[in-house]
Image (cartoon, helix red, strand yellow):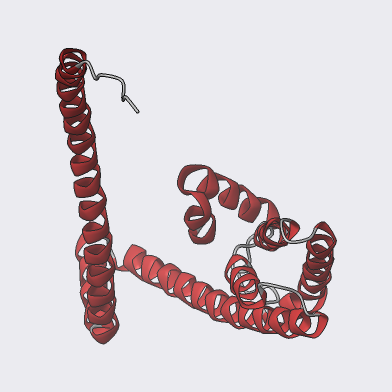
Amino acid sequence: EKYPEIDTDFVSEKLNEMVPNLIKYGTNIVGNVIPMVFSISVSIVKVMINILLALIISVYMIVGRETFKHQGKRLVYSVFSETKGDTICKTLGECNDIFSAFLISKAIDSLIIGCLCCVIMNIIHLPYTVLISVIVGITNMIPYFGPFIGEIIGLLINIFVSPMKGIIVFLTLFSLQMFDGWYLDPKLIGNKVGVRPFWIIYAVVIGGGFFGPIGMLLA
């Protein structure tokens, strides 16, 4: 059996054409991948440093809160008159009391809702129970819009598993949020904030527009 002859000149010519292209292609890949990996690494390091700094600063602020409070009062009275200084300190104290009462009450409310969500979903045997319960608990901290965000996320997570389960999850979360809105939230929080609903909704919309979910929570 005779094998066909190989044109070595043709093969050499094609290899000579391909090698520079392969080298160029490899150089482009390396040139693009290395900066991307470096950028991602720097971003991760920055996030970790920011988290560490935030924890350290938070601990120092908690430990030295009385010192900061005293220094803040000295600064206020050094800039303003005694009458205005008293008004400013009293207003800031009221803001602190209102914000603390709201934050603690809302955190307890969200924890209860998250736990109830976990129990109910386990009883119904729905998937992603813990994940959805955590999301519902966190988003519940956002006034008015938070419960709807949790319901939509729960629906989207489950609708890819089964459309029927997605609808059941949505109805379950909707019923849970109705219980929270009509009974649990008023019992725990009441009128601690003292701000009209219009201004709360306005603040949440503006905060979400500029900074996303974090901005909604802070607003």
Q: Quadrant of residue 47?
A: bottom left
Q: Residue furthest front?
A: 1
Residue found at x 22% / y 80%: 60
Whole-percent x and y of residue 87? 40, 67
Whole-percent x and y of residue 78? 19, 65
Whole-percent x and y of residue 86? 36, 71
Residue found at x 31% / y 25%: 3
Q: Quadrant of residue 142?
A: bottom right
- Horizontal placement of 45 versus 83: left or right? left
In the displayed structure, 208 sits above or below 186; it is above
Whole-percent x and y of residue 93? 43, 75
In the displayed structure, 78 sits above or below 133; it is above
- Horizontal placement of 82 versus 154: left or right? left
In the displayed structure, 171 sits above or below 3; it is below
> In the depicted view, which residue is nearer to us: 211 or 49?
49
Q: Quadrant of the N terminus?
A: top left
- Horizontal placement of 46 versus 90: left or right? left
